[in-house]
Amino acid sequence: MRIHCPCCGPRGVAEFSYGGDGTVRRPDLSVTDTDAHVAYVFERENPRGRHVELWHHIGGCRHWLLVTRDTLTHEITRVEMAGRFAGEAARMPGAGA
Amino acid sequence: MSGYRLPQGGSHLDRSRPLAFRFDGEPMQGFAGDTLASALLASGRVLVGRSFKYHRPRGVMGAGPEEANALVELRDGARQEPNTRATMTELYGGLEAASQNRWPSLSFDMMAVNDLLSPLFSAGFYYKTFMGTGQATWHFCERFIRKAAGLGRATHLADPDRYEKTNAFCDVLVVGAGPAGLMAARAATAAGLRVILADENARAGGRLFEDGVHLDGLAPAEWIDGALREIEAGGGRILPRTSVYGYFDGNVLGAVERVADHKRKPAPFEPRQRHWTIHARHVVLATGAIERPLVFSGNDAPGVMLASAGLAHATRYGVAVGASVVVFANNDGGARTAIQLADLGVSIKAVVDPRREIDPALAAALGARGIRLETGAVVAATRGRKALAGIDIRGFDPISGALGANVMQPGCDALLVSGGWTPSVHLASQAGSAPVFDAALQSFVPGAAREAWTAAGACAGTLDLAGCLAAGLEAGRTAANACGKTAENRDISLPALSGQLAGAELPFPLFDVPATGGAKRFVDFQHDVTADDVDLANREGFRSVEHLKRYTTLGMAADQGKTSNVNAIALMARARGLTAPQVGTTRFRMPWTAVTIGALAGRETGHHFAPVRRTPLHDWHVAKGAEMMTAGLWMRPRAYIGPGETLRDAYIREATAVRQRVGIVDVSTLGKIDVQGPDAGEFLNRLYTGGFAKLPVGKARYGVMLREDGIMFDDGTAWRLAPNRFLVTTTTANAGAVLAHMEHYLEVVWPELRVHVTSVTDRFAGMAVAGPQARKVLQAALGEGDVSTEACPHMGIVRGRIAGAPVMIARLSFSGELAYEVYCDWPAGLAVWETLIEAGKPNGIMPYGMEALGTLRIEKGHITGAEMDGRTTLADVGLGGMASRKKPYVGSTMTQRPAFVDPERPVLVGLVSRDGQAIRAGSHLTLPGGGASLGHVTAVTWSPALGANIALAFLSRGRDRHGEVLEAAFPLKDERVAVTVADPCFYDPDGSRMHV
Amino acid sequence: MSDVSNEQPRTEPQTTVARPVVGRLVPGEAAGAEPPALTLRELSTGALLEVGAWPNHLEKVTKTLSDLAGTTLPGRPGRFTESPSALVCWIAFGRFIYLGAAAEDTARVDGALEAEDAAVVDLAGARRIVRIEGEAASEVLNKAVAIDFDPAAFPAGALAQSVIHQIPAVILRRSETVFDVLAPSSLADALIDWMTDAALEFGYRVGEPGAVL
C-alpha cells in the first residue's frame, strides 16, 4: 500500500504508523465526565468501506495525516494534513499533487 | 526406449556447448540452453520423482512453471535446494540434482506402500483419524507421518549466497514477455514511457517458439531479439528469470529475479536472487495460459505429459519426449501438435479425440503423415508403472459421456494430453474481482480490475497468435493513455505473420474420463488429489470451492493449482449438478510461484539483521571488557567483567562501589526531546501527571505520562533550561513512542499550542555519576562550574565545562545515592567520560553496567518497563501522590474507573527470599502451599547492599501484606521460593543518602 | 534483571560483542566488484540546526532563513537550496535543517529567529553525513527506500526523509549522481555498515572526508 503524503509524495506504508479513527475528537481538557473519555478511547465504528483514518508519517516528515481509505478495497481516495499545518500545506505550490 | 535428442532443431539449444551434469549421482549430458527437464528427457530419463502422498512414480509433465511432478533437490551442501522445478532449472555444467521423496532409491521406494494403503489416505484422512479422541494417536503418529509426507529436504547449513532486495519504479510494468507482452512493452516504450518487462523464463517469447510462424519474415527468435533491443533502446528494463509473484495494494508488485540460479554459484558479490518491489503506474498482465491435463485412470504415469510441453521440448530443446507418441486432446491443438511434432521428426502413433469429428484439414494433414486419428474415443487407462508402456483407447459417447468398446491398446512411451487452456489469472485475481467463467474456453478469465491493470493475450482468453499480438499492442496503448500519453504509436505496427496459423483451440467440454480398473485419476498431481477425493468431499458436504480446497488440499501445493483448479471445479460442478461458474473459483493468493525465504530476507540476516545503535562510549566499553547487551537497537554494557570474574562477581563489585564510593554509567541511550516554544510549559503540564508549568528555570522534575486510558506510559525528567524550553528525558525503550505521542497532541489534538518537539537523543552524550563521592569527583573534573549543594541542590541544573566541552549537569538519582547526570555534545562524550574517570580515580570510581544499574534500582523500588508493562497505574506502583488534583492531564479522568480503584488490584511490593534461594522473574505469588495466583514477580536480583535475594512484584492487596510470608512459584522449573512481602523501597527508605 | 547465577568466570577480557559493528569509512579502502563504481565518504559541516516555524509564521521564517543563507528558499518542503556558506533543507511543513559552513552560524541563526516565530534546536554532533557518489548511487539507496529517484521525479535539489534499514535518514540529491545522507550519530556507523554492504555488488572506494559545503 502506498500513501501519498502531502509533504513527501507517495511512500510505502512501512513508513507510516496507524493512528486510528480520524473522525473522533478528544474531549476538551476541562471535560471530567468519564463516559466522554471512555467513548473517545474505546468506542469505535468498524466501517465497511470508506473510512477516515489518522496516519503518522513517522518514517518521513513526521506529520500526521488524515487518510480516506476504503477498508474493503484499501483504495485511498484522499490524503490531507491532519494538523496545524493543514492551511499552509493547502496553499503551497504543488499542493494536492 | 523413451525420449531422445532429435538430430536437429531446438531454438534454445547451443549444440556446440555440451554440459555434463549428474542426476541421482549418474553422469549425464545436455547442452547449453537445456533445462534440467529437457536434458533428462533427452537422456531417456522417464522417472524423475515420487509424489507427495502416495509416493507414486512421476515423470516430467510440463515444460514451464506449471510443472507439478518433476521437483528435484538441486545442488548439495549449503546450497542444497529442495522442490525445484526441473522445467525451470537451466542446465549448467556440473549441475547436481537428486530426486526426492524416495527411500532408499527413486526406483525402489519403500514408502510407495502408501499407494497400497491409499484408501486410508483419502481426503479428510487426518481430520477423521486424529481429531477428537484421535488426538493421542496423532501425537504418536505425527513423526512417522511427517517423515513420510512432504517433498525435498532443505539444508541445515547457512546459505552462503547473497540475496538483494530493491525497489523499482516505472510507468508500465509488463508481466510476461510472450507475444502480447512484447507488443505491449514495445507500444508503451514507443509512447515514451518507462517500461519494465519481466518474464519468469530465461528467454522471452512465450509460446511464439511453438507457433511455427514467421513474423515480418523473421524467425521467432530473431523477431523477439529485435523487440527486446527496441525496448531497451527506448529506456526499458528487461528482467528475465523474474517471476512476478504478487500484486499488492496501490499497484505495487513483488517479483523475484533468479539472478544466478542458472550458475553453479554466483559470481563474486553477485546475488543469487534479487527481490524487486515494483511500483508501476499501470500494469499489463500478459501472463499467458497453461494447458490443462485430462483426468483419466493412470494419468500420472511417467511419460504422460501436457501436449504443449511435448511440443516445447521438441521446438526449444530438440527433444523427442518419446519414441512412440500418442496425443489425446479435446481440441484441435492436439492434432496440430501431432502434425508439428511429426514434421520435427517425432514418431506420432495416433491422435485420440473425444469429438466425433475434427477440422477436416487437420484430419487430412494427419493422414498425410500416417498418423492414425481416433475420433469419438478417449484414453481410458495407462499401462506401465515406472514408465508408460501403453494405453487403452475406448470409444466415447460425447453426449452421454459413457465409455464405449475397446478400440485398441497400443504400446507407447509418451502420451501428450490437452484438455484446453487455462488462462493464468492469478495476478489479476489478486488485484481484481472474481475471475469470470468463459464457456468457450471452459475456463476462467480475469474479472474486473481493482488496480490499474490491463490483461492481454492468452491470460485474457485470447488464444490465437494474431489476436495476442493485437491485444498486446492495444494494452500497451491503453497503458500509455492511462499514464497520460496520448499514444504516439505510429512506429509500432503489428508484425505480418506467415506460416501455418492456428486458430483459437477451443476445447470440447471433456474434463475427465470415467474410471476403469482401479487406477487413480489424478486432478492435483503435486498434492496427490484424485477425482475420487473430489467426489468424497462432495458426499461429505465440503462442496464450496473453498471447502473443497481445504478438505482435499487441492490447489494448495507449491504449484498453486496451476493445472488442477479448473478440472476440480468442473468435477465438483458435475457432482453437484451445477455449472462451473455456479461453483466458482477460489481467489488466488500470492505467490504465483514459490518465493525463497532468502529473497524475502535479503541482506537482513545475521549481523545485518538490524542496525546497531551505539553511544559515543561504545568502543571504550568494549575495550574495557564490557559484556555488551542489546536494549532495542542499542548496545549497552551489561557489566565490565574482569579477569577471573563472573558476571555476578562483576555487577556486585560495581553496585557495591556505587553504594560505598562512586560509580559512573553511560546513560546516552535515554530518550531526549527538546520541547520548545511559548506554550512548552503548558504542553508538558497537559502530558505529565504532575505540574510543570511553574517549574523554575534551572530545575528538573520527575514526571510520569499516562496513556489516554489512564495506564502509565512512560517516566522521565523534564529540565527547564529557559522559560520557553525544556529538555525531556524518556526511558530508552520509549524514546520514539513519547516523541510520536507528543507530535500527535501538537498536530492533531491541540494545534493551537506553539510548541516544537525534536529528538535530541543523539545530540547529547549522557553519563550518571553516582555514589557518596559523586560530588567530589564531579567537582574535580569540572574545569568550570559549581556543583556544591548551594549551587546545585537536589533536582538542580548547572552548566559547566569538562575537558573543554560545555556540559549540563542535573542532580538526579536513579540509584538512591547522591548522583548527577552529565550531558555534553555527542562527539565530546568520550573526552568528558575519560576526564570523569580520571578525576574519580582517587575515589575509586568504577564504571558500572546494566546489571548493577538494575540491582541499584530494585533496591530502591524504582520502576522501569518491567513494572510499566501497559497494565499498571500510578497508584499501583505507589506513585499516586504524583497525580495532580489541581489540573487535568492526559489520562486523568480515566484513572477513576472502577477497575482502577478496586482494592483487590495488585500493587507494587518488595519480596525478600527467606532461605537465600534466588527468586525467578515471572514467578507467581501464592499462599504457602499453593493456590490461586495473587500476583507476579517483575524483577529480581541478589542485593549486595542487603545481602539477600530480593524482588519487585505486583501483589493483590499488597500494601496490607507487608511482613506476610508467601510463595513465589515458577512451575516451569518446578520451583517454589518462600518470600516475605516488604516495602518495595528496600534501601534507605527515607532517601537521606541522596539528600547530602 | 536476568539470571546470572550460572555464568562462568571470565579468563580474559572479552572483546567480542553480541552484534559487532564494522561500519567504518577508511579513506583509500575499496571493496566489492571491480572497478569500483561508487565512492563513499564522510562529510562534515560547521553548524547543523533544526528550525521549527509556528503555523502562520512560515513566510517570515523562510525569509529570515533565505537572508541568513544568502539564497532563496524553494517554494515547498522536499527541496533544499544552497549558497557557498549554507545549505537549507525544507524537510517538512514548518521544519527546516540549516547546515552552515561555519560553526558560528549556530549562534547567528539562533539570534536571527524570534521565539515568537520559530524554535531553534542545535543538532551539531547529532547527525553525521555520508556521501555516496556514482552512477549506481540511486540503486544502492533504492535497496532501502521506495522513492523514485528518476531525475525527472527527484532532481538535484530534491530531498527526502525516509528510513534506510530502520535508520531515519535525510537524503539530499546534490547532483544526478551524488547523494548526501544525514543520519543520527548513534546510527551513522550502522548506516555505513549497511551502505558498504549494499554497495559491494557495484564496488566502492572510500574517499577522503570532505565538507558539505
Image: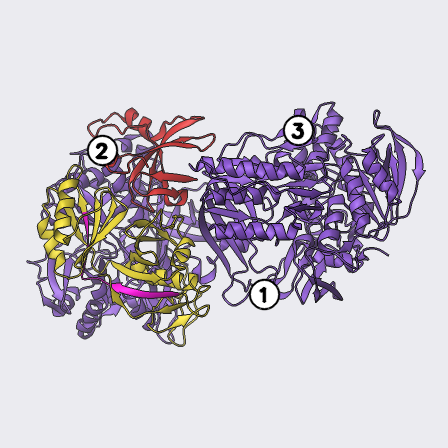
User: Total number of numbered labels?
Assistant: 3
Residue B712: image quadrant is: top left
Q: Secondary structure at mark 3?
A: strand
Q: Residue at x 84, y 37 (%)?
A: B363
Q: Which residue is mark 2?
A: A87
- Residue positioned 83% across, 41% down in the render: B365
- Which of discs 3 and 2 lies nearer the camera? The answer is 3
- C23 with respect to B834 (left or right): right
Secondary structure character of the magenta stretch overall:
strand
Q: Is the residue C133 above or below the residue B501 in the image? A: below
Q: Position of residue B680 (x, y in %)?
A: 15, 42
Residue at the location (66% across, 28% down)?
Answer: B438
Residue B694: where, in percent of width, then height?
10, 42
Picture disc at residue B438: 3
The tag on residue C15 is: none
**Residue under label 1:** B265
Instruction: State the yellow chain.
Output: C
